[in-house]
Image: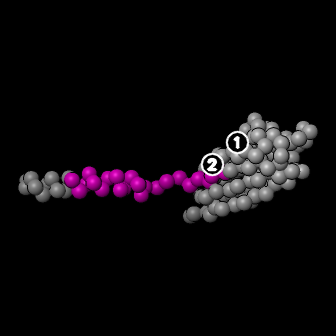
Amino acid sequence: MNRPIFLRCLLSVVCLLPLLALTACRSNHVQITIENRTGATVQLLEVDYPSASFGADQIAAGSDFHYRIQVQGSSPVKVSYTGPGAKQFQATGPELADHAQGSLTIVLLPGGKVEFHPNFSVKQ
């Protein structure tokens, strides 16, 4: 075996491995940000999305909460929380589906109003 050729081939393979790792398949995720713009602390926040949910005990007024999800299935996003005066609020947002990737901002506003700002796409 010709050693210089073998070493060059081995070096080429070793140099290409990190590139392959960087281009390998990655899971699709959606970064969800919840902005509390109600003017008061919200409690018992729950966000339901296809096949799962997440939440927070409380989010202070003016604070943001970040959570990253992987979508499996298809259904709309639902938000529920307890606001000032122990009032319960619920809202339904955009549909999430398998392979969704990007971000979704959920803005909690005074009076139980909720805005959804989707910035995601569904990759096949």
Q: Quadrant of the C terminus?
A: bottom right
Q: Position of residue 9 (x, y in %)?
A: 19, 56
Instruction: Based on the picture, tell me whether residue 12 belongs to the magenta stretch.
Output: yes
User: Quick one: 43 or 25, which is closer to the camera?
Assistant: 43
Label 2 close to label 1 by CB (< 8 Å): yes
Q: Is residue 102 left or right of residue 107?
A: left
Q: Position of residue 30 (x, y in %)?
A: 62, 54
Q: Which residue is mark 2?
A: 69
Q: Position of residue 102 (x, y in %)?
A: 61, 58
Please report whichever mark, 2 or 1, sits nearer to the chain's N-terminal start.
1
Residue at the image position 10 percent from the left and 55 percent from the top? 4
Q: Secondary structure at mark 1?
A: strand
Type of amino acid under label 2: Ile
Q: CA distance from mark 2 to mark 1?
A: 9 Å
- Over which residues does the magenta segment extend? 11-32
Q: Position of residue 1 (x, y in %)?
A: 7, 53
User: Quick one: 101 or 84, which is closer to the camera?
Assistant: 84
